[in-house]
Amino acid sequence: MKPIEALDLGIAGNGKIYRNLSVRHLVQEALQNGEGTLSDTGALIVETGKYTGRSPDDKFIVDAPSVHDEIAWGKINVPISVERFESIKGKMLAYLQNKKLYVFDGLAGADRKYTQKFRIVNELASQNLFIHQLLIRPSAEELEAFNPDYTIYAAPGFSCIPEIDGTHSEAAIIINYETREVLIAGSRYSGEIKKSVFSVMNYVLPKMGVLPMHCSANIDDQGNSTVFFGLSGTGKTTLSADPSKMLIGDDEHGWSPDGVFNVEGGCYAKCIGLKEENEPEIFNAVRFGTLLENVVTDENGTPDYDDGSLTENTRAGYPIHYIPNAELSGKGGIPKTIIFLTADAFGVLPPISKLDNNAAMYHFVSGYTSKLAGTERGITEPVTTFSTLFGAPFFPMDASVYAEMLGEKLRETGANVFLVNTGWCGGAAGDVPRMKLKFTRAMVTAAINGQLNQVEYEKDEIFNLFIPKSCPEVPSEILNPKNLWKDEASYLAQDNALAAKFAENFEKKYPDMPENIKNAGPKKN
């Protein structure tokens, strides 16, 4: 634990700087600093205070001359001036003077052809532990010659002054692609560090011919990879956690000419409602070296995963080797199957359908799922949710850049793309039960195994989807939603309503999208 005094971080003063401490030492430091406590299994438990999740309204991108024309500026990618960035940075580094700091040198991108080196400077040992476990840990040889591509400064104790700094609150997450720096102020929520790395990679990887993806991925014993896109509640984690396959990663990947690779070296799992019988891999990963955020425990340190009193967004961060069926290389072959997951509360999307390449790009850009009536005050009918590329907050460039890359990958590889509705079919949510998981698993398995390449399809003209007429281990009558609706007029009304919402979203967000993608979406009848 000998501190490194001379590490050049641009921070003056005589504070102790600890670089690349072991997990044991980081946990010890966090406990000594009063940052948290240990659970009964040895996990480090912390509370993140005011910020228990990402703060998208506090995220900015520096509007530097060299990147101005590359960024899709708007409500998500909000500009901040170079001058204000430099001012905030100067004050943050002054705040960090003479403090004990923790530095982790880590890698993003398991395929070393595309790896980016990140240096993370933390005020908190617990956050340094988190990013140590979430990024790829370099070898001794890689550390010896380590020269960071990007540097992230995370100072939760530093508060911005909105009236002076031009921020929205005391918190700020600011990415400067020109100087290759990230500032994270005012938030103890570790996910801001993880997603800042991802946001950087989503800018860097396309320039290297790699499609960045907000998805999970697994690999079979033949080397075939499958990727799963989907927003919260659609079953991405559940369906990719297949005991017959190896998990490449659960959240962030790149698709290169050689195959799929994990951007990370760890997992950041939601813990609310966690039960060993349902998710044994995650449950058993909560041990020494894991960081638990905002999980309530009893007097013996036993977590109560059903307690959401601090937040519903309770989290566990741990290295991927804590998962027994992890593919530790972080790499897989060329994907043969792409799964887009949605939970359609309107009940009109088929439980599984095949997309042609243009429709695949359309749905990739749209990123659709739905909230349910009654889940929020004032919501009396299903509410559509569209998140560009299934991860809108993290993609700095125009959506067409990523969509056209996907289209190129599909043309080159011939990969099959399926839209899987894990929500409701044959009636709106509340009127009919949700699609049975056993049927969804059977459909996904048939898609991956190539069995759905051998069956007949019928076209849904409104949504431009191809619906299989049969699927192994799935009753044929549930495959087409219009056959399940008791009232055809109600079905057509819901079908047209959802198609109109797709069209409205697309016209509003992507007016300059290429015509082949624009025309591949739903058509109101």
Image (cartoon, helix red, strand yellow):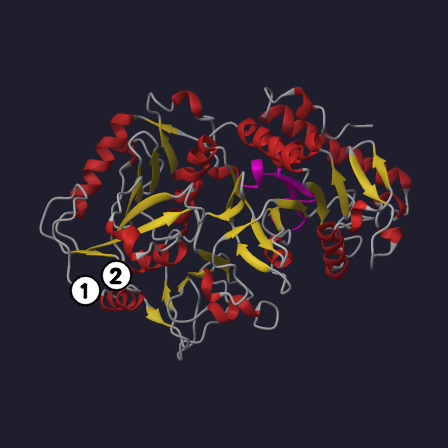
Q: Is residue 19 left or right of residue 479?
A: left
| SS at circle 1 | loop
Asked where in the image residue 408 lies, by quadrant, the reply is: top right
Determine crowd level at label 1: few under 14, some 14-19, many 20+ residues with C-alpha closer than 10 A. few
The percent position of residue 404, horizontal first and vertical second, equals: 59, 28
* Quarter where residue 95 is shown: top left
- Amino acid bearing label 1: Met
Q: Residue 440, position in %: x, y?
A: 74, 55
Which picture quadrant has residue 247? bottom right
Q: Residue 317 carries which label?
A: none
Q: Name the residue under label 2.
A: 21
Q: Residue at x 60, y 55 (%)?
A: 219
Percent of width and height locating residue 209: 49, 33
At a point 57% along the width and 60% down the height, the residue shown is: 246
**Which amino acid lies under the numbered mark 2 shown in the image of this protein?**
Leu
Q: Does the magenta stretch include residue 377?
A: yes
Per the model, the C-alpha gap separating discs 2 and 1 is: 7 Å
Residue at 38 percent across and 59 percent down: it is 133
Q: Earlier in the sequence, mark 2 or mark 1?
A: 1
**Residue 48 in view in this figure:** no
Q: In which quarter of the image is the N terminus?
A: bottom left
Please say if the residues under marks 2 and 1 sit with CB atoms less than 8 Å apart. Answer: yes
Residue 523: image location, x then y, percent: 77, 27
Q: In this view, does 302 lie above or below 80?
A: below
Q: Residues within 10 Å of mark 2 (few under 14, many from 20)?
A: many
Q: What stretch is highlighted in magenta?
A: 365-391
Q: Label 2's element? A: loop
On screen, 66 above or below 194? above
Q: Does the magenta stretch include residue 515?
A: no
Q: Is residue 315 above or below residue 356?
A: below
Residue, disc 1: 1
Task: Please state, as top left, top right, bottom left or bottom right, where the C terminus lies in the image.
Answer: top right
